Amino acid sequence: MTRRPVFIGILFALLALSGCAAKKAPALPPGGAPHFPEYVFPAVPGQIASPAIGALHELGWQWLQAGDAKAAERNFTAALRQSPSFYPSEAGLGYTALARKDNKEAASYFDRALAANPKYAPALAGRGEALLALGQRDQALASFEAAVTADPQLSGLRSRIEVLKFRGLQDDVDAARKAAEAGRLPEARTMYERTIAASPDSPFLYRELAIVEKREGNLPAALTHAQKAAELNPTEPRNFTTIGEIYEAQSEFAKALDAYNTAFALEPSEALESKIDDLRSRAAFAAMPAEYRSIETAPTVTRAQLAALLGVRLDALLKRARGSNAIVITDTRASWAAPWILQTARAGIMEVYPNHTFQPNAVVRRGELAQAASQTLSLIAATNPRLAASLRDARGRFSDVAPGHLSYHAASVAVETGVMAPTADGSFQLSRPVTGQEAVAAINKLAELSGRPAR
């Protein structure tokens, strides 16, 4: 805000101060557009000085707005010489220093004015300008806000404050992201918390803070902030994806699936669909008995474990198989794998011994795995003529299994289809125990051949 006084009044006041009306009147600044319209005129509150001192002060302001900082400084200094406690001219000198781009000196002048009157709005506004020029954005913002509080009429500062807040928010978010990318997670978290304090209704801030907290391992806090983001913006799929990832890290698969499905409903994508499918498999695996979950790392595999692998991975194929329901098994009632044992036995994939036992705890050997694979391949080949032809033509060469051996055909088709592999020396080793890794690889290949993706 600028101000041009009534010059005749100023002349009389100055002449009276000099004590001689006959002396030559002081020069007045030229008219024209103000050079610094954004500066707040340091108005004189109440009756803190004589009219003559006030006139000197106003003349200094006019010289400043005319672009003559030296003349302005002379008048402000003259006013202070007459009244050292006249803090409006301290603020005037602060604005004069700002015009000269001497920001440190400007800040010191404004501080002197504020020492005399801490709620003096023109000095608070000027101090904000000086601090901003010195790169102290947060302090400048606080000074501008204090100025508006002291004088609500300073409406021009309000938009300045909003711009500073927005720019500050952007700067802090950029800095937080860079800190997170560099692995400086505590620093990133602190910066996100600060930006949230300044902008508590910005959902993306809560989401990004949640991601940092998840990386730090603080899953409860991450979940709280991700849920806050979703509450503030329930139409943003990334908020629910973040919630899903946190639940997934907590092994709460059902809740994770709910969150992912919500995200998919808002914005379908192949990546999210794949994530949902994978999580369903993981959730199903996590719900399985410990005996099943330990198969892949087991040094040997039992018949119960092989039956469970076949029953889980080839469920649809086994259900389509026409088998006998009149099967008597006497030793599996208490087995964890009883349903899958019965399923594989009815489909004719695994053998029930003549004494009606299955022997679920017996170790599976490569010959038995080849037999189960051969039976499964026959079921698949029933609807796949090309596979059926390759099974008929399979002729393996093994150093330890002759063509006349009972297990020769089973070993041959298992190798021909890639379900199993011979050893490095060309032998098949029918009696060697099957490892968990071998069993999983074989069943995955069978699932692939049946039209179901391996996992």
Image: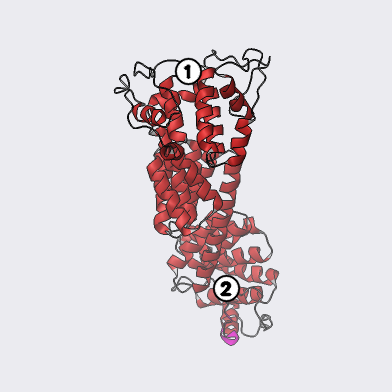
Indicate the secondary structure of the residue bearing disc 2.
helix
Task: Point out residue 130 in the picture as x, y percentages from the top left corner.
Answer: 60, 60
Display coloring? secondary structure
Instruction: Kindly tell me whether residue 249 is visible in this rendering.
Output: no
Q: Quadrant of the N terminus?
A: bottom right
Q: Separation of disc 1 and disc 2 at Cα?
A: 102 Å
Q: Is residue 201 above or below residue 360?
A: below
Q: Quadrant of residue 247?
A: top left
Q: Is residue 413 above or below residue 239?
A: above
Front residue of 375 and 226 = 375
Task: Point out residue 86 in the picture as x, y percentages from the top left corner.
Answer: 51, 66
Marks 1 and 2: which is nearer the front?
Answer: 1
Front residue of 43 and 125 = 125
Residue with the mark numbered 2? 57
Front residue of 434 and 382 = 382
Q: Is residue 148 above or below residue 300?
A: below
Q: Residue at x 34, y 25 (%)?
A: 336
Indicate the secondary structure of the residue bearing disc 1.
loop
Task: Point out residue 121 in the picture as x, y percentages from the top left corner.
Answer: 48, 67
Three-letter amino acid code at the position of disc 2: His
Task: Point out residue 131 in the picture as x, y percentages from the top left corner.
Answer: 58, 57
Residue with the mark numbered 1? 364
Which span of residues is magenta-colored? 3-9
In screen coordinates, is 391 left or right of 322? right
Front residue of 196 and 232 = 232
Three-letter amino acid code at the position of disc 1: Val
Query: Hey, which residue is sitting farthest front in the picture?
Result: 404
Q: Report if residue 4 lies within the magenta region.
A: yes
